[in-house]
């Protein structure tokens, strides 16, 4: 038995799709922004400032502590 992909009812058929409306900048402002960077897409105030060196150190120590605990749990249990 061979499968015919053309007979698949879920296959995309452009003749069955309705015609797309033209894009409206008032209804879809995200597509017409000048800045497509992440902070520009998230909006004003959505991004945070740079972290201090101490915050990076705490984060790194936290990750290392977590990995150490997981490794200890795997090998000693």
Image (spheres, rainbow, N blue to C red):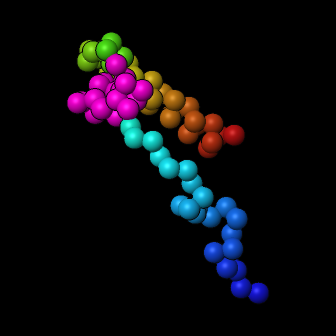
Residue 13 lies, with reference to residue 25, above or below; the image says below
Picture mark count: 0
Report if residue 49 lies within the magenta region.
Answer: no
Start-end of magenta stretch: 24-43
Percent x, y of residue 52: 26, 15
Q: Residue furthest bottom?
A: 1
- Residue 64 is left or right of residue 52, and the answer is right
Q: Position of residue 57 (x, y in %)?
A: 33, 21
Q: Nearer the viewer, residue 39 or 29?
A: 29
User: Residue 62, how many percent across, how many down?
Assistant: 45, 24
Q: 38 or 67: which is nearer to us?
A: 38
Horizontally, residue 15 falls left or right of residue 7, namely left
In the rendered image, is residue 60 in sight? no
The single residue placed furthest to the left in the displayed view is: 34
In which quadrant will I find the C terminus? Answer: top right
Residue 40 vs 11, above or below: the answer is above
- For the N terminus, the quadrant is bottom right
- Image quarter of residue 42: top left
Instruction: Write the residue at 40% across / 29% down.
Output: 28
Image quadrant where residue 44 sits: top left
**Residue 36 among magenta residues:** yes
Q: Is residue 8 visible?
A: yes
| 32, 75: nearer the viewer | 32
Residue shown at 57% from the left, 36% from the top: 70
Q: Position of residue 2 (x, y in %)?
A: 71, 85
Q: Residue at x 26, y 18 (%)?
A: 50
Q: Tell me which corner region of the image, top left, top right, bottom left or bottom right, holds residue 53.
A: top left
């Amino acid at each position: 038995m061979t499968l015919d992909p053309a007979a698949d009812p879920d296959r995309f058929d452009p003749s069955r799709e309705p015609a797309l409306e033209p894009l409206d900048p008032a209804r879809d402002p995200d597509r017409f922004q000048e800045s497509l960077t992440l902070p520009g897409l998230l909006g004003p105030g959505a991004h945070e400032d740079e972290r201090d060196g101490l915050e990076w150190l705490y984060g790194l120590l936290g990750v290392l502590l977590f990995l150490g605990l997981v490794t200890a749990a795997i090998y000693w249990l």
